[in-house]
Image (tube, rainbow, N blue to C red):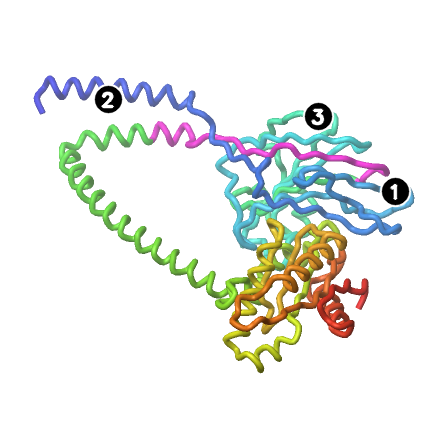
Amino acid sequence: MNDKSFNSVLIASILITLALVVGVHFTPDNRLLLLPDSSARLYLLTKPLPDGTPSSEWTNDQHTSWKCTNPESYKIDYFPCAVTLDLSKTADIGLNLSKFKHLNLHLDYKGSSNKVRIAIRNFNTAYSKVSDSNSTKFNAIQIHTSELNKELHLSLTSFAVADWWLSQYNIPLSRSAPEMDNTLVITVDFGEPIQPGIHSFELKKIELQGDWIATEYWYLGILVLWLGSIFIYAIKRLLELNAQAKHDTQVINQLNNTNEQLKEETNKFRRLSTVDPLTQLYNRFGIDQIIASLSGNSHLQTPDTPNYSLLVVDIDHFKRINDQRGHDTGDIVLQHIAKIIQTHLRAGDFVGRWGGEEFVIIMPGASKKTAMAMAEMIRDAIFSTPCNLEKPLSISASFGVSERQNTEDFATCFKRADNALYKAKDQGRNCCVYAEEHL
């Protein structure tokens, strides 16, 4: 490089350095939006009151609005009214919020309480245990309700560790400062005894805001860059790194291709594990997965869990078909029935082969009336649609129908539908019977 080129590079480097020094103060902030977010996991703390009504309940489908009802006659030290935003990846691993400076909060409130508390719970193996959820450090801030109903810009340094938590877990002074490097949850509740009456909330926004990189680290990086560029051999090293980068790119591309192949094989085996090979419907394991996804975690199941109706279908005299026509014909009949059921289902309904000649239909959100109408329509279609066989064969099916009750698990709902199916058989088959309300 000649002097002219060197001077040009030097001037350019100085201008770039000045731009970097000044530009750090104009770069957009690092933001992490936690709400609104369709994937956010929000849980509501609620317990039955003496009259059977819940202490707290959601008031919108997005689970961002809720209300708490505290009767005048209900006297307890801690009224169950709290919402938790779960940030955890596992029981002891959460999000690192220490790199942010502010918490942007928009919480609307209507009620008689003076203060609302925001708490950030942090897990540290030095004092936290997975078996004790309360052992996570309680970093909290009290907000006067008159300041709510607008977006607040809260400094994370204003959060303080609760004295009761420090005393309860005998935390030494060296560990008494707020920590947010492994946050599991953010909670909204009352930091004082709740006043009687109705307390309504709407959580519109939770967002973390901070610098992408601290200013001091930014300046240190510029200094290191300048010192590194002084060495003449950096040019040679740069060429070597460029060659290495190309090699690494090839290796990464090969690994990506291998990874895609593994994903395809995984999806293939996952499908095979949940699909009945004969009818191409869900098998029993697949139905179990659907029920699990509808009900969610059992410990979170509430009366608000999405409802569904259950149809248990059994082909009439199927053993006679196998005995008189052979199992090949029996397989054709199963495929025939499966196709008819699939043709008549609504979008969002599920059907699977439960075993043998028995099928299960799951209808999310369907009432008793809708489920019975669907059962009758499918029953009539089976009875009136000829099966593509050399010799004519009359086929019919019996149906047991049940609607899931609020506190009922799948096994109980299925048992009631199965009992109804047996009644349909006893009544002469080729009919639909609705299940008893209780076993």
Which comes before the other along the chain, label 1 or label 3? Answer: 1
Q: Locate residue 91, reporting x and y percent.
A: 56, 55
Q: Nearer the viewer, residue 245 or 435?
A: 435
On the rendered structure, is 95 left or right of 401? left
- Tag 2 and tag 1, C-beta contact below 8 Å: no
| Residue 334 in which image quadrant | bottom right
Q: Locate residue 125, reporting x and y percent.
A: 54, 54
How far separated are the C-alphas under marks 2 and 1? Answer: 70 Å
Q: Nearer the viewer, residue 371 or 113?
A: 371
Which comes before the other along the chain, label 2 or label 1? Answer: 2
On the rendered structure, is 108 left or right of 29? right
On the rendered structure, is 41 left or right of 65? left
Q: Amino acid at mark 1?
A: Pro
Q: Is residue 288 magenta?
A: no
Farthest bottom residue in view: 323
How far separated are the C-alphas under marks 1 and 3? Answer: 26 Å
Mark linked to residue 178: none
Q: Which residue is mark 1?
A: 71
Q: Residue at x 63, y 27 (%)?
A: 152
How far separated are the C-alphas under marks 2 and 3? Answer: 49 Å
Give the structural element (helix, strand or loop) at label 3: helix
Q: Which residue is mark 2?
A: 13
Give the structural element (helix, strand or loop) at label 1: loop
Q: Residue at x 81, y 39 (%)?
A: 194
Which comes before the other along the chain, label 2 or label 3? Answer: 2
Magenta range is 193-220
Judge the density around disc 2: few (<14), some (14-19), many (≥20) Cα neighbours within 10 Å.
few
On the rendered structure, is 45 left or right of 276? right
Q: Locate residue 239, reporting x and y percent.
A: 16, 38
Q: Amino acid at mark 2?
A: Ser
Q: Which residue is mark 3?
A: 147
